[in-house]
Amino acid sequence: MKNITVLGAGGWGLALALSLNANGHKVTVWSPFADEVQNLNEKRTNEKLLTGIIIPNSINITTDLSVCQNNDITVIATPSFAVKETAQKLKSVKPNGIVVNVAKGFENKTLMRLSQVIESELPNADIMVLSGPSHAEEVARKIPTMLTVSGKNEQVCKTVQEVFSSDILRVYTNPDTIGVELGGALKNVIAVAAGVCDGMGLGDNSKAALITRGLAEMSRLGEKLGAKAATFAGLTGLGDLVVTCTSTHSRNHRFGELVGKGYTVEDALNIVGTVEGYYACKSAYQLAQKHGVDTPIIELSHKLLYEEYPVEDIVKTLMQRPFKEE
Ligand SMILES: NC(=O)c1ccc[n+]([C@@H]2O[C@H](COP(=O)([O-])OP(=O)(O)OC[C@H]3O[C@@H](n4cnc5c(N)ncnc54)[C@H](O)[C@@H]3O)[C@@H](O)[C@H]2O)c1
């Protein structure tokens, strides 16, 4: 049995906490928000994010971060924009054990991957990345799911694999941390574009083309940043891309769909809430520009989300690009 604290009491943090609790570990969920913690402690459910799921009393829910001093594992499950400040807070309580990041995105200011951001705050910790096609709602309902863990220390990877795996959650290891992490961050950008495609009322042909060419962009940019191309054909690349582009659970897809229907970006964000793909688009675009990588879907998504490019011109612009080999 391990002592595990999950930082972030949103859909994914709670779903992982439920799964780890069912595996027999001693689990605490932390949030910085007293009202969120009080609500969860009173109701023992989050009807909006995990409908019909009861959070057992054996899961401790708190605003007290000092619990991490006795940890074997700390899981960071906040939105990407809060990972740095959460790692800083964690550092201040002198945490023990392994740190597993499950947030997907970049630090927009520095274009760093989130594990690099955590490492800059906690240089002595064993930092792992856990990613893959996984809607919180389905993991909480015990629907079979597969994930991939990656990090510098192979033995620690195996520990995380064992701790998180169960009859409904199968965890693979992959030594390509850059690829595993970039897959999770970049697929959200393509998922927004897939939502736009659906919102505009385009068909299956268009979406299949978008997913395939989107994967090619992820892979091209990823390779330039040090990842292995093969990783993008795995769970954290193609797997996560498919689940996010085709499902109604995805906030990225839902946000894109509203933009495709003609909502302003601001209104769509207000309706959907935190949309990782919106933030990741900015970093992905800047990384592609910086490294001279051709990423037309990411570039057009950036124009649409940040430069007021008209949604009705998107298809024409993509279709009229110069002919090339696949
Ligand atoms: N929801 C999913 O199915 C899913 C699956 C895999 C990965 N992820 C990733 O996990 C991360 C969290 O996703 P989520 O859906 O649980 O998000 P969410 O928006 O539902 O919840 C995030 C939680 O993080 C905490 N939080 C929010 N702002 C914070 C701040 N400023 N400082 C510290 N903590 C803060 C709060 O407890 C909040 O409930 C995201 O990066 C997401 O891409 C989500």
Image (spheres, helix red, strand yellow):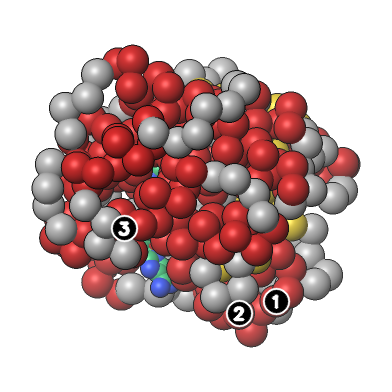
Q: Nearer the viewer, mark 1 or mark 3?
A: 3
The answer to whether marks 1 and 2 mark residues whose Cβ atoms lie closer than 8 Å is yes
Residue 55 placement (x, y as % from top left): 33, 44
Distance in Å between CA atoms under marks 1 and 2: 6 Å
Q: Which mark is residue 305?
A: 3
**Which amino acid type corresponds to the residue marked 3 in the rendered image?**
Leu
At a point 33% along the width and 22% down the height, the residue shown is 206
At a point 79% along the width and 58% down the height, the residue shown is 126
Furthest toward the bottom, the residue is 92
Ligand 1's image quarter is bottom left
Mark 2 = which residue? 88
Looking at the rendered structure, the secondary structure element under dot 2 is helix
In front here: 117 or 87?
117
Mark 1 = which residue? 121
> Is 213 situated above or below 224?
above
**Which amino acid type corresponds to the residue marked 2 in the rendered image?**
Gln
> Ligand 1: does it lie within 8 Å of the C-beta at label 2?
no
At a point 47% along the width and 47% down the height, the residue shown is 298
